Amino acid sequence: MAAHVVFDNWRSAHAYPLNTFQVTLRARAQRIDRNALTAQRLKRAPSIMAKLQRFAAMDLARMQDIGGCRAILQDVEAVYALRAAFNDSRARHVLESTDDYIVAPKDDGYRGIHLVYKYVGRGTKTAYNGLRIEVQLRTKIQHAWATAVETVGLFRREAIKAGEGDPRWREFFKIASNAFARLEEHDLHVTAEHQRLALQLQAQVDELEVLNRLAHYSEALRFVQEAGQTGEASMYLLELDLDEDELSVRSFRDSERSRAQEAYAAAEERLGDRGDVVLVTVENVMALRKAYPNYFADTTLFLEVLEATLRWDYLYIAPELPFPPLTSAPMLPVVRDEWWPKGIPSKVRRKRRRLR
């Protein structure tokens, strides 16, 4: 049997246990945060191959995240509440590992909680026993940061997420992660550390032209949604062609799972290194852009949180000064919906009104 057939079959085998975990994750997440987003995906072939090349001892059977699902919640408290819900459950699946990247972030600044389970089935489902599924828990700000990293990596064609590419961008995202974490602490008392982070970020925003570049990615991308049963869809195939600056989205119903996975494999082979492809499951098409904003070059929330951190000095240290514009772009609008963590926007908006 050809190697690519073995690979496709192995990846596809994770679809059933992955869906089982995603259903559980959605139910538990929405009991804690009614606005929680959940999504699932089978890992992309280029990502799998890159991981096999980076780690000499790695093989497909040992890879933990071929099947992955994710919950995006309002704030850090909700993330830990959801982790507790998993820890306290009596599920038969085996929790193999827990990584708390909120307490101990990755070297690149990534934050979130990862739970890796081994699936344990019954009856005919024992065929899937031992397959690993990764469950990721993030706040909305952590998700905005992580998907901004992927957006820049995609459009610059650099594996920034894997520690490659321009070191200036890697350093920028690392510092931004630290600043965003301070913002999520809900302590609005500015310290010397806040000032230092804000100054470092401003220097990098100017040097890298962060605001203009991210805006350009979004403006340049053409979005094409192919005809399909969108109202009945549960799966979406996203094809990002970087040569053409075009994102194509195809929808599939749950009964078309096999056809969707075949289309996924064919799209990966067709695009090669010209772009990126992912097959995802979300609740509805409205959740698609929120769960995978990097494919839409949508860094709106990331930029709004970045703005909040860049304005620390003026918001909390020198209220008598006029509210300054950012040096690289006009001021962005303040977020007024549920995407901000509780407690942050109202305080920021009150201070802004006093300044004016």
Image (spheres, rainbow, N blue to C red):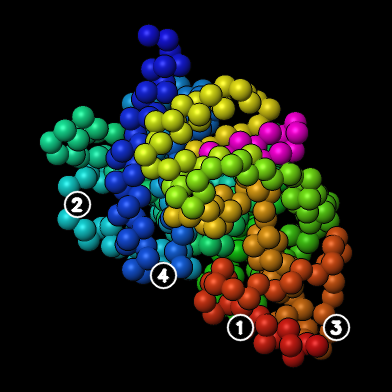
- Which structural element holds mark 4? loop
Q: Quick one: label 4 or label 2, which is nearer the N terminus?
A: 4
**Which numbered marker is on residue 190?**
none
Residue 101 appears in the picture as rendered: no
Mark 4 vs mark 3, CA separation in Å: 39 Å
Q: Is residue 198 visible?
A: yes
Question: Residue 185 lies in magenta, yes or no?
Answer: no
Q: x%, y% of residue 318?
A: 78, 84
Report the front residue among 229 and 104.
229
Secondary structure state at the residue bearing disc 1: helix
Where residue 128 sits: x, y (%)? 24, 32
Q: CA distance from mark 4 to mark 2?
A: 23 Å
Q: Residues within 10 Å of mark 4 (few under 14, many from 20)?
A: few
Amino acid type at mark 2: Ala
- Mark nearer the N terminus (1 vs 4): 4
Q: Which mark is residue 322?
A: 3
Q: Magenta segment, which residues?
A: 237-247
